[in-house]
Image (cartoon, coloured by chain):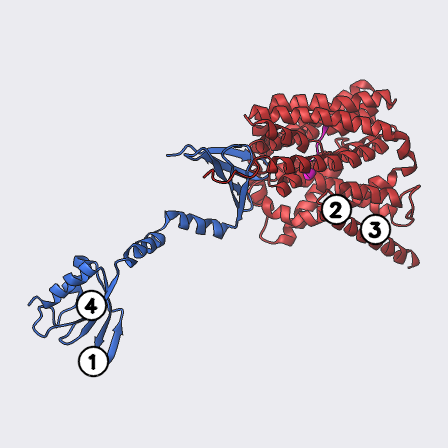
Amino acid sequence: MHEGARLLLELGGIVLGLGLLGRLAARFGFSPIPLYLMGGLAIGQGGIAPIVTSEDFIEIGAEIGVVLLLLMLGLEFTGRELVASVRSTAPVGFTDLVINAAPGFVGGLVLGLGLTGALFLGGVTYISSSGVIAKLIADLGWLANRETPAVLSLLVFEDLAMAVLLPVLGAIAIGGEFSGVVLAATAALVVVALILAIGARHGDRISRAMFSSSDEVNLLTLLGITLLVAGAAERLSVSAAVGAFLVGIGVSGEAVGRARTLLAPLRDLFAAVFFVFFGIQTDPRALPGIAFAVLALALASSVTKLFVGWWAAARVGAGRSARLRAGVLLVARGEFSIVIAGLGLAGGVDERLGLLAVGYVLVTAVLGPVAAKIVDSRSVSRPGPRPVGEH
Amino acid sequence: MTEIERTNLPGVGTRFEFTTGDGRRIGVIHHRSGRREVFVCPEDDPDTAIVTLDLSDDEAHDLVDLLGGSRVVENLSQLQHQIEGLAIDWLTIDPHAKYAGRTIGDARIRTRTGVSVVAVLRGDDPHPAPGPEFQMEAEDVLVVVGTPEGITGVRGILRSG
């Protein structure tokens, strides 16, 4: 009984704290993700107020958070959109993958994380945060700008690349014999391709069969299926995150709009718990030691993202200021960098990976939006007041 | 017909746009939620939207109406044209008139002159908005609205015996 009271008190304090942090972030127009991570740092080992009882619950919540993050990401896109985006952005998309994973990979090798650790750090620096970026585009009113479709297509490409990379990285993290890794990775890729193909062809029919007119039934059905598939994927070492992502893509069509509105609040809660948990696992006392490495990574990978954005916008015929906007948009990293780092840690990669990922996301998730706002205020004032009598 | 460009916005919806005669890029974003966003770019920077306008489904339809797609608006604008030369008159039916004892429809007043009979006064009883089946009698007073020329025409019709 005493234990129960303590658990509720701790959880209440944490969730309320997250609410306050979210409010603070909204006040200044920033993503709350860096604040959630810092909140986690504060209540974890070596933080200012370490929690005691609720860690188990938070760990399970974090697991569900990853699953919901990826499910919602999958629901955002239809199979057809994915195919169209890959076709139109393939050259930029592959360049994006190579030159943005490079700083993380090289940095990982230099820091001595080992080959596996370096691969994961490459994943962390590669993937931009579609959550942070989508919010920025909406807040700044950039949706109608010429470069925006190119940016969105690139994000879709990245998300799809992640669906392919996560199982491969997962197989590598588990390690074992080389042939075993190749076999597991191949099996994972075949499953991914199969589900994508089914989703693209029969997504409408599947969702029609799944959804009823009752919101409650829909919520339970979709959540149940997702958790089952995620669990099965985890069992097959494909990673639960990928399983959830594939369920999201497989379920498409009209009914998806409802599913999104039903799941969004759940996702918000558990994703916040996930970020907190990641912060809890990280010992803030070790952060100063890697500050230089984090800043160097952030700087290098911001330059490479700027280049990719610039090029993607130039390809659709946008002018210089539009290219700059596309570049700064892509700088922000967030939820998926943390997901990748979490997968690495679960696979037993050097613990500094988590530390680097937290520091890296803290820097880029703030730097990206700030840079975007500066660019926006400049481009708005640029035309200047018209001289009197021009008309 | 203007050439309309269609762009897919993954995860958001679809964007339709075209360039106007004076070189401005304007367009509409259809969000999957049904929301519509109208945007306008300045002449000197076709990449950047300066005006964006959020519209709900209903508001979007209202805007389409205002832009001239519906009959209601056409009628409204016709009415406005007439206001400048609008006249109202009271015409008494002569007992010897051809149409005394016959209906408004028989006289084909609106068809021939464009003038509307908005009311008929019979003694102290007003009969507002009479239909074409309304039977006119001697000494009835017709309240008519139309152009001065049209009303002159009606006077002629009612007098002609």
Of residues A269 and A78, which is closer to you in this image? A269
Give me the chain letter of mark 4: B
Q: Say what secondary structure mark 3 lies in.
A: helix
Of the 4 image quadrants, the one containing the N terminus of chain B is: top left
Q: Which chain is red?
A: A
Looking at the rendered structure, whether the residues under marks 1 and 4 are on a common chain is answered as yes
**Residue span colored magenta:** A126-132
**Residue A92 x %, y %:** 63, 23
* Location of mark 2 (residue): A25
Residue at 69% x, 46% y is A223
**Residue A86 x %, y %:** 60, 26
Q: How far is the residue under mark 1 from the one under mark 3? A: 84 Å
Horizontal placement of B51 versus A183: left or right?
left
* Location of mark 4 (residue): B133
Q: Which chain is blue?
A: B
Residue B111, compared with residue A270, is above or below; it is: below
Give me the chain letter of mark 3: A
Residue at 71% x, 24% y is A304
* Location of mark 3 (residue): A14
Identity, as a three-letter code, of the amino acid under mark 2: Ala
Q: How far is the residue under mark 2 from the one under mark 1? A: 76 Å
Pair 4/2: label in front: 2
* Location of mark 1 (residue): B123
